[in-house]
Image (spheres, rainbow, N blue to C red):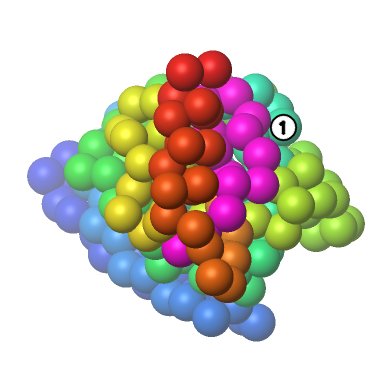
Amino acid sequence: MDKTMGRWMFVAIPGMAFSIGLLFFCSGVDALAYQRFQPENVLETVIITEAGGEPYEGKVGVAEVMRNRGWGLEGFAGIRRSDLHQFLSRQPAWAYDQARQALQEARAGSNLTRRATHFENVQTFGPPAWAREMEVTVKIGQLTFFKKRHGVNASKLENEMARLRAA
């Protein structure tokens, strides 16, 4: 492929409620990233971009959140990275192996996150606005996991978020 030629790839996984178009510029080292980002690897890619620096349990947690959301990709910012193809080309093979194993655990019914549907790196990015209506379920590595709670007491949640930031 010509080094300057871009290629659109449409990804649609049967049985999943999403589709996504991605632009790749493939050449040399970037060809490996393109090869890794095939439809069967989309979910692994989400785990790597969202929890690449986290312990294995954090990767399982991200997989559980995807499962708890019905395997949709909406809201996962990592796959919208402007340098996605370069980022993927720098990832070692073991990162993909861990992501694949984390997906297998989530598909088998793991529940490390206690049915969480959201997560955030609160220590780095601060508590997200949407967290006011959520309950903290667990903290794994730098990731704090949340699920919806009815009748949330905002001050109690703010105290919990402050406690997690201090930890």
Q: Nearer the viewer, residue 163 or 124?
A: 163
Q: Which residue is mark 1?
A: 57
Q: Secondary structure at mark 1?
A: helix
Question: Quick check: can you spot residue 93?
Answer: no
Q: Main secondary structure of the magenta part?
A: strand
Q: Front-most of 56 and 153?
A: 153
The amino acid sitting under disc 1 is: Glu
Q: Residues within 10 Å of mark 1 (few under 14, many from 20)?
A: some
- Picture coordinates of residue 97 (x, y %)? 70, 33
Outermost residue to the right: 108
**Residue shown at 65%/23% (left/top)?**
55
Q: Residue furthest top?
A: 167
In this rendering, position of residue 78 left or right of residue 119: left
Residue 139 lies in the magenta-colored region: yes
Q: Residue at x 59, y 24 (%)?
A: 141
Query: Quadrant of the rendered structure where residue 81 is?
Result: top left
Report the residue at 69% width, 54% height from top.
Answer: 64
- Residue at 49% from the left image edge and 47% from the top image edge: 157
Quadrant into which the C terminus falls: top right
Residue extent of the magenta highlight: 133-145
